[in-house]
Amino acid sequence: MKKRLIVIGGGPGGYTAALRAGQLGADVTLIEKGQLGGTCLNVGCIPTKSLLESSHIWAKSSQWFPENKAGEVPWPSILERKEKAVMQLRKGVEGLLRKGQIRVVKGTASLAGEKRVAVAGEEQLLLEADAIILATGSRPVVPPIEGIDLPGVVTSDELLSVAELPKRLAIIGGGVIGVEFATAFSELGVDVHVIEAAERIMPNMDPQLSRQLKELLERQGIAFCLGQKVVKIIKKETEGLELQLSEGKSVQADLVLAAVGRAAVLEPLGLDKAGIRVVNGKIKADAYQQTNQPGIYAIGDCASPIMLAHVAMAEGRVAAEHALGFPTQPVNFDLVPHCVYSHPEAAMAGLTAEEARNRGFDVQEGVFPLMASGRALVGGETDGFLKVVADRKYGRLLGIHLLAPHATEMIAEASLGLTLEATLDELVKTIHPHPTVAEGIQEAAMSIMGQAIHLS
Ligand code: FAD
């Protein structure tokens, strides 16, 4: 008899787990209370990248062809383009699930005793399974700041669909989401201010990268208040909002985005009653994504230390394979690529030099500045660099850090190299196409070995 698997949540983690389980011959039910595709497809990865594609084209064409500049930003068309992409991809996911013979149930699921799931929706159901995968995702955190509930303070969910572009946008949080929205709205002519409590934006990335990215974004007109917190938001008598900062400064805005992080969605799963451990607000899962209750798995934002769609998908595959008794390998979080779709883009995979030193490696670094790249020059995007971090003893690749156009595409090479435990020598021997920005990765590796051709 086929094994029965229930997946709760139809985001990238959940639908990947469902489809993989279907491929392995299971009888799969996927329960989704909102839209298939979850955060990523509906209010995350896809709509933000559509917005950023539009804003970049707009900014670049205004820069290259100044006669275009006088035109008004076509905000309704930008929204429409984004919606079309989301709908098309959502239909795509629906089609994949249909073809994979996954039963999709609309409704809100909760655990209802030994391997049973209750669904509240158009109809009330009680389903039974041999294994359950929890993939309920996350929601934006609303920081405890006085005035955070004023009209005009929004989360990323709402900002993606505001009817009109604001004149002034203040963003609380200089992480990936804050930086991506800052890039898009600034490119569309909005006056953007980012307030970040840490001393630098993207604090987990290579320090040179985060410093240079901030400088480039400042040059594009984005203002940063680093090392400061928003203590209060007040409604101005005239118009707009005022954000009062910890060091006495204030920032004026028409719209405020709270982008301080995301929290796992755990309600109304009934985790307590089911005896499932929650640690620091997330479901605790082992390397195979299994919770402390055998046969119940948790993947993606509701459980993972890294809240990214590709991590959720990787964990979904592991959970499905393990739950059905197939051989599988846990996700190696050291190998996860991180991307920022700013302009220029930033991406990293593996360790920063500092992390590598802390793990005891004798580190060597090679940097290829984009000024030396012909492809970057013709694209008018010579700000940035490609950095390779390697171990001195065996030349093993430890990390790659990119601030460059197409960085989010190029980083896949780094992920493959890290997965295969590539060495500098192998990177150098790999023939890269010319003219591309990616050949700078090869040059950065060559520079460590004293073989750089295009660097003096
Ligand atoms: P989700 O995508 O959140 O899906 C969970 C689903 O479960 C939802 O559809 C929800 O309705 C459903 N659900 C919850 N509870 C129940 C219940 N009880 N019953 C039934 N259904 C339920 N990541 C990237 O990798 N790249 C990016 O470029 C990127 N950009 C982002 C931009 C923004 C603005 C945001 C907010 C996030 C972004 N992310 C990005 C993160 C990415 O969206 C998440 O990591 C990813 O969606 C997590 O997938 P998931 O399947 O765990 O959860």
Image (cartoon, grey):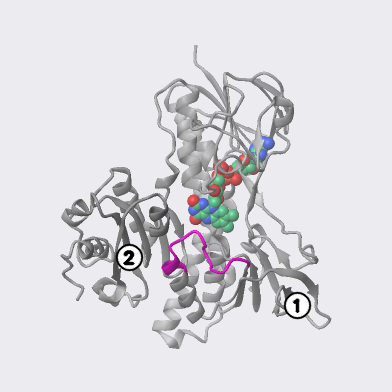
- Residue occupying the point 56% across, 79% down: 189
**Pointer 1: what residue?**
240
Inspect this view and state whether residue 449 appears. yes
Question: Going by the picture, which residue comes out furthest to the right?
Answer: 237
Queried whether the magenta region covers residue 371, the answer comes back as: no
173 or 412, which is in the foreground?
173
Whether 50 is drawn above or below 61: the answer is above
Quadrant showing the C terminus: bottom left
Determine if the C-beta at disc 2 is less than 8 A from ligand 1.
Answer: no
Identify which residue, 366 or 332, lies in the foreground: 366
Q: Between 416 and 96, which is closer to the camera in this rendering?
A: 416
Image quadrant assignment for residue 450? bottom left
Q: Are marks 2 and 1 in contact (CB under 8 Å)?
A: no
Cα–Cα span, label 2 and label 1:
41 Å
Query: Which span is picked out in magenta?
Result: 197-210
Magenta-highlighted stretch: main secondary structure?
A: loop
Q: Residue at x 58, y 44 (%)?
A: 301
The label nearer to you, 2 versus 1, is 2
Picture layout, residue 446 above or below residue 214 = above
Say what amino acid the circle numbered 1 marks. Gly
Disc 2 on helix, strand or loop?
A: strand
Residue underneath mark 2? 386
Residue 151 x, y percent position in the rendering: 78, 67
Q: Earlier in the sequence, mark 2 or mark 1?
A: 1
Residue 98 visible to an observer of this rendering: no
